[in-house]
Image (cartoon, coloured by chain):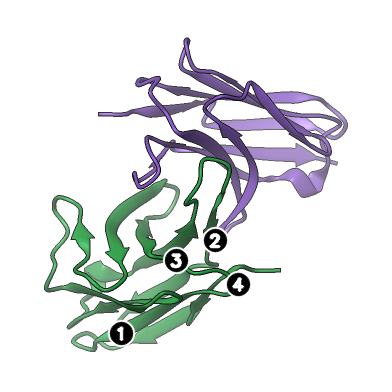
Amino acid sequence: KQEVTQIPAALSVPEGENLVLNCSFTDSAIYNLQWFRQDPGKGLTSLLLIQSSQREQTSGRLNASLDKSSGRSTLYIAASQPGDSATYLCAVRPSNAGKSTFGDGTTLTVKP
Amino acid sequence: GAVVSQHPSWVICKSGTSVKIECRSLDFQATTMFWYRQFPKQSLMLMATSNEGSKATYEQGVEKDKFLINHASLTLSTLTVTSAHPEDSSFYICSAGGAGSNQPQHFGDGTRLSIL
C-alpha cells in the first residue's frame, strides 16, 4: 500500500525567502506525481505534474523534482510572496486508472 | 478557467435531508471521476471512484447506501448524501481528468456540507 508523507507539516518564512517542501512515498512504481495548492475552504489547484519518466518540471517560481529510486519529490518555491500562503499537497498516482494517494500537506505561511 | 465545476459550493440543511452534489467536467469527457471527503486540517480521503455507465467503486468503510453516486454521462457525476446527519458534515471534493501520464487531475472547488 502506497504511503505518502509530507514534511514539514507547517512552515513559516519571511517574504522573499526560497523554500523547499518535501514529499516522500513508499512505492516507487508510480505513474505520475502531482503537486497541488489548496486555499482555506477551497478546492485544489494543480501546480505541477511530473510523469514517471521525468526528473523535474518548472512553472514560474515553482520547480518540482522527482527521484523515484529514493521515493522523493520536492517543490521549490523561489522568492516567496505572501500570496503563496496556502496548504501544499502532493499526490502520487500508481497507474492510468489508479486512484491517487495524497500526503497530509504542508501549510505554508509567508509573512510580509 | 475552471475545468471541473462543482455545485453547490455550500449547503446547510436539516438532519434527515438528502443532498445532491454535482461534478461536471467542462471541456473534456471523463469516464472516471473521483469523490473525496476532507475533514478540517486533514488531507483528502478518497470515498469512491465514479465510473460512467457502471457502478461506482467504493473505498473500504464508505457506506454505499449512504453516499449514492451516479455517473450518467461523460461530463457529469453526482454524489447524493442520503438522510444526512451531523456527522456527515464535511467538505466534499470531486476530481476528473488525468487519463494520461501527462494529464493532470483537476479538482472542483468543493462543497461545504453542514447538517444541523
Task: Give residue B113's position: percent from left, percent from top.
Answer: 38, 75
Residue B27's label in the rendered image is 4
For badge 1, the amino acid type reads Val
Q: Are marks 4 and 3 in contact (CB under 8 Å)?
A: no
Q: Chain of mark 3?
A: B
Residue B30's label in the rendered image is 3
Q: Residue at x 47, y 11 (%)?
A: A69
Residue A48 placement: quadrant: top right
For badge 3, the amino acid type reads Ala
The picture's colour for chain B is green
Q: Residue at x 35, y 21 (%)?
A: A27
For badge 2, the amino acid type reads Gly
Q: Write down the residue under mark 1.
A: B19
Q: Write down the residue under mark 2.
A: A43
Query: Looking at the colours in the rendered structure, which chain would you say is drawn in purple?
Result: A
Q: CA–CA distance between discs 1 and 3?
A: 23 Å
